[in-house]
Amino acid sequence: IKLIKAYGANIIYSKKEEKMKGAIKKAKLLAKQINNSFYVDQFNNINNEKAHYENTAKEIINDLPELDAFFVSYGSYGTINGCAKALKEHNSNIKVHKVILSNKNHSIPGIYSNSKINHKCDDFIDKIDKVVEEKAYNIVKEIAFNDGVFIGLSSGVNIAACLKYTKQYQNVVVIASDGGERYLSNEKLYVNLNYEKEEIIKDLKNLYNNFFITDDLDNTFLIKLQFFCAF
């Protein structure tokens, strides 16, 4: 919200208790009331999935054709549907991990929506990984502090899931779906770390020592087995 305000936008709130359904309802109403407006409808717009099927997945396959596993959380299902379908067509042995939060009432927006999604399809999902919300916050803070990279909470969730498989896979792609600037209004990012710091540092070092991380793909961490790492 703070970032949007910085661009000069007028923030119009929906009822908090209505959550995502209320926001969608409000957006549809405003689209009808405001001239020359456009309602994207990211949850039901087939072009969302199509864009990832035709572009994101293509970049992944071109850069890492010998892919073993793909990790991504979901909100509108566009990324996971489009990429999973294309990756499975490329190689049916690629394992697709859908990442979710273990607690239903969480503070990370965009990962799960109560809205109806017409194009949701789990046919290409091999495994569902549950991540504790606090783990995502800890990873975001630790990477920002140690590496100077301010990733978003959705990215932290995906990386948290991937950390469990550093010894199982060689070539992995993890979608880093957002940057930390999207969460400037989230006060939980600014409290002290409340976990055993050594544990997550050990996990991240294990990730860094076994994988090469690059941002060659737009908004994507491409992770490949190497002896070094770089952002």
Image: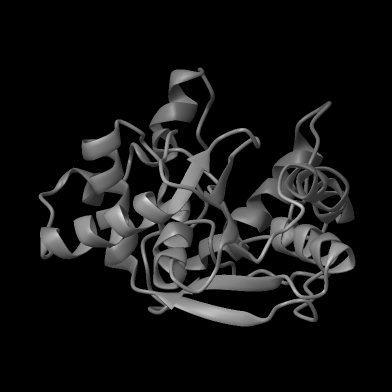
Q: In which quarter of the image is residue 199?
A: bottom left
Give the colour scheme shown.
Answer: one colour
Estimate the x, y position of residue 136 in percent, counting from the top left: 34, 59
Inspect this view and state whether residue 229 appears.
yes
In the image, what residue occupies the spot 21% across and 55% down? 201
Q: Can residue 73 be seen in this view?
A: no
Q: Which residue lies at the image location 29% right of the left edge and 35% below the top edge?
A: 147
Residue at the image point whose x is 44% and y is 71% from the top: 167
Side of 113 where 19 appears, left or right: left
* Above-or-below relation of 205 to 216: below
- What is the x, y in percent for residue 48? 80, 50
- On the image, the x and y values in percent for residue 17 come to 45, 67
Q: Going by the image, does 22 lie left or right of 179?
A: right
Residue at 83% across, 42% down: 55
The quarter holding residue 146 reads: top left
Q: Is residue 115 left or right of residue 40?
A: left
- Of residue 9 and residue 139, the one placed in the foreground of this image is 139
Q: In this view, does 106 lie to the left or right of 38?
A: left
Nearer the observer, 190 or 220: 220
Picture coordinates of residue 171, whole percent (x, y): 60, 58
